[in-house]
Image (cartoon, rainbow, N blue to C red):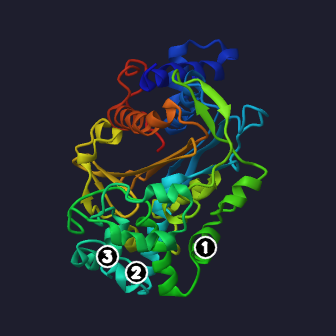
Amino acid sequence: MHLFRLLILFSTFWLASTCKEKHVPVEKQVQDALLVKAKPRDIFIEVFDAWVQQKMDSCHCPGAAVTIVTDSTIRLIKGYGVRSTDTDEPVDMHTVFRLASVSKNFASALAAIMVEKGLIHYEDPLVKYLPAFEFTPKEFSDEVTIDNILSQSSGLPYHCYTNLVESGMALSDIIPLFKQVKVPFAPGTEYAYQNAVYACIEPVLEKATHQSYAALFQEYLVDPLCMTDMSFDYACILNGKDVALPHTMDQACICGTVKPISNKYYNTTAAGGLNASISDMSKWMKALLGNNPDVLSKSALDSMLRPRIRTSQDHRYYNYWPGVQETYYANGMRVLDYGDHLRFYHGGYANDYRAEIAFDRDKKIAICALFNSTCQLANDIVPEFFSFYNQWHDSILVEGHPQLKDTLNPNIQFEQ
């Protein structure tokens, strides 16, 4: 059922149930409820919550966690389903999932903080910090900047040495191997998604600050934002007590067997090695919306989120979301251009975990969803959420609800 129709049905049912004992006609219940400080945003959240549960059931997703933030307020934070089909223990707000490539925007935020402190500069060449970094032609490799690696525009071929990352090779051993690569494009001219070279931000920050990446991450992001469930190593998620386990999905999208947690990408924390709960991610969404300027200032966010390189030639599914006219990559975040405003998005996939985050700085709304399988809902949740939000906002807060206009008092003022 389309979400907007579901909103109408849910609103009528909810309002009817609240006045059932009074035997008041439904039309009068709607009008009376709306006259007494109705909160359509609360109905919107409750309906979306019901839609997620419905889709969880229909796509056979074992477990998920979702948070919605508007401005500085957490409107929804909830676990769905189970951590493992072997135990049926429920997902809660502190259940830990893998973030996979959503880890990249944390790394870029940490880099933006160090730029603000003057410890690094986006235009610094990578070889200033990593002399062993070189590819062919050498003049191109000498031109690669910190900004290029964070915006996926280094010039290296698509997913260069991701196979070595997945094999477990240490980043320090991968860096000298770039010398064997011939690059087709000058830095900053073409988009090509990377993991290995993206993770080079770790040794860059370590050399610039004389601290480990883990210590920097803890000091500047984890501790000040109180992300108490977050970790960045394999041992933590492997030995955690409240952890969602990955599940395979068969060709019919039916949940299959529980899988072991893989150690892939923990050798490149910045590219894909973070673990977090939905509680942690709700705090991260608030920071990305600008509510923690003492941690992540507006200028740091502005610099991090500025579109760097066009990505629409990549033909990925988010390029075809309703209303998207063009797509770009900023630093650690995708930029979806809707013509009159921008939204920001990133997805992550590793070891049959999925992570999805998206936010709109203008409308001050954000969503994050974590899954322990590659279910269809993971593909649908972000575009459906914003499509529903747009219809709800335009119809209820701007134009007045068209389906209920005959029962509503035209002077009703909605709380926002």
Q: Residue 351's x, y, as percent?
A: 58, 45
Mark 1 or 3, nearer chain start: 3
Front-most of 71 and 50?
A: 50
Q: Which residue is mark 3?
A: 145
The type of residue carrying mark 2 is: Ala
**In the image, residue 413 above or below residue 117:** above
Q: Residue at x 37, y 73 (%)?
A: 299
Front-most of 58 and 44?
A: 58
State whether residue 408 appears in this view: no
Mark 3 or 2, nearer chain start: 2
**In the image, residue 351 above or below residue 162:** above
Q: Which residue is mark 1?
A: 214
Q: CA distance from mark 3 to mark 2?
A: 14 Å
Q: Residue 92's x, y, as percent?
A: 71, 43
Q: Which residue is mark 2?
A: 132
Q: Residue 307's x, y, as percent?
A: 28, 61
